[in-house]
Image (cartoon, rainbow, N blue to C red):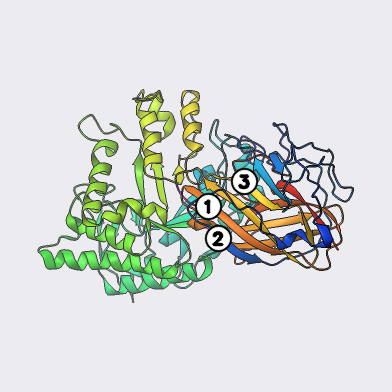
Amino acid sequence: MPEIHLKSSPGRPGEQVNRLLCLALVLIVAVACGESTEESTPDGGGGGDADTDTDVDSDTDADTDADTDADTDADTDADADADTDADADADTDADADADTDANGDVNVYPILHDEVLTNPGMGFANFHFGWWCNLPPISFTPAECAERVEANWPVNYPDAGTSYFRWFWSELEPVRGEIDFEMIDTAIQSANALGETLSFRVITIKENELGVPDWLVGAPYNVPGESFAGTFWPDYRNATFLAEHERFIAALGERYNDHPGIDHVDIGTVGCYGEWNTACITGEDTIFDILDPQNDADFQVIADAYRTMIDHHAAAFPQTPTVMLGIGVDSDWEVAVMLHAIDQGAGWRVDCWGDWGIWGDAWNHMEDLYPAMIANVTAQNPDFVDVWKTAPVQLEVCGTIDQWQDIYGWSAQPPDGKVYRTFQWALEQHASVLNGKFRALPDAFMTELNEMLRKNGYRLVIDRFNHFGEVRAGEQTEFYTNWRNIGVAPSYRPRTVTYRLRNATAERTFASPSDIRTWLPGSWPVRDQVTIPADLAPGTYWIDIGLLDRAGTNPTTQPLPPLYLGIGGRQADGWYQLSELTVTD
């Protein structure tokens, strides 16, 4: 693998700093009569779609070092030469143009960059770790698994922030009530060791075998179904099946709902491959027809069963994003089931992204199935086109991307190349995670693929950071940050916006209540009222910002590094150095 923690995204540990870094350091003109400058209100400016004004408390004090300068442009409203205070642990001084303002506030304009970012919940996913580890029986520790995956990373495959797994119910619960949590836990911890979150799907259909546990079809449960050349299709309408399905999914939710190591759950307990189809069954057209309905009442019973299975996922994972395969081409019944998933908060996915004729010239997913699905579902619910604003859109490639070139001869040349159009379609649908099947990618596609990845999912930048240059310990000041999401979707998992004051001897952090999951593409001004701790020693402190992860339990996971932003100034620990603040007594 191309060193997942050391390449692609700027500022990964061990990476050469590739930009000139500059910091405008500020001296503030004191207000006459000894009045403290924090009593004035900094210029908020910037405008935008939201303006959040919040109080922020401080957290811990710790020793810290900082030897890098912030990659920012800055201006100050005090007419002074800016020198580095001896209390701030910085290597260099920076000059700044300054204007005089009685308020003494500082404006910092971080430099944007266009490098591809690698964050959880966006961009390319790795698929089952390339099958290099963690298939039953588990024989590798998470650290060993991560090492094997990194050593075998496919050529040109982008760094991944998310792993994607599928498990059969039969392998997760071979004995009723004894769920193999260790298998899932180890996958989550292995993803965590790779700097990734994990998404997963549970499947009930396995070709030529039982995809459900054998105890479910045996006494005393005796769930009926039909075998098609050895592939068992359970009767999803069966009351016992539905009861056991609810118990099983609830148990998964009890352990993994809102776990920071989980990116999303794929609702996939219906159909071949968990993809709500009958593709692995010869002669059966749809997930309705295979159960041989004779009238509308029979169709209604089947639809109710599928809705119930969706409800089980929604109830088990209320704080975890879910996605549902986009169905709705074959009948209005499919549309009704699809809309029920959307009504329950699910996003949607497709499983043959990039098919322009794999099955021949007469029909394909990109020009026929997907436009029809979107049109049919939108006709019933016009809000479907806005689902991406609250729930993810996930795409899985058809075949493998190398086959698009080697077998079908498709091009990424804009504007008409089929691969180029595939990438543009992803952006038009506001897609986040892309399952590229974890295979080597052609050199010829990389320019356009990277261009897509610069916009795919969320891409957060800071246009302006404003604060008073000087504040007394024990008093309140305001940090104004003009955030902007220049991607095509929000983040669907929470991160804590956190400010940090630090110098050579002390460190304090301040968590903002801002919810980045609400940051759709556009501008998001945030004002946070920060109380400087009364016991913070006078001196000059760096102001850093980070979007922080949290540790997980059951299984134990470490917080991932702060999210990568589309700006310079990232430090070795993942925080972004923005400015300086002078604390007085």
In magenta, the rendered stretch is 489-493
Q: The residue tagged with tag 3: helix, strand or loop? A: strand
Whether 212 is drawn above or below 419: the answer is below
- Is residue 469 in view? yes
Asked if the stretch drawn in magenta spans residue 491, the answer is: yes
Q: Are marks 1 and 2 in contact (CB under 8 Å)?
A: yes
Q: The residue tagged with tag 1: helix, strand or loop? A: strand
Q: Are marks 1 and 3 in contact (CB under 8 Å)?
A: no
- Which of the two labelled residues, at mark 1 and mark 2, occupies the earlier sequence position? 2
User: What amino acid is found at the position of numbered circle 1 in the picture?
Assistant: Trp
Q: Residue at x 72, y 31 (%)?
A: 20
Q: Residue at x 63, y 42 (%)?
A: 148
Question: Which residue carries the number 1 mark?
Answer: 524
Q: Which mark is residue 464?
A: 3
Image label count: 3
Q: Residue at x 60, y 42 (%)?
A: 149
- Which of the two labelled residues, at mark 1 and mark 3, occupies the earlier sequence position? 3
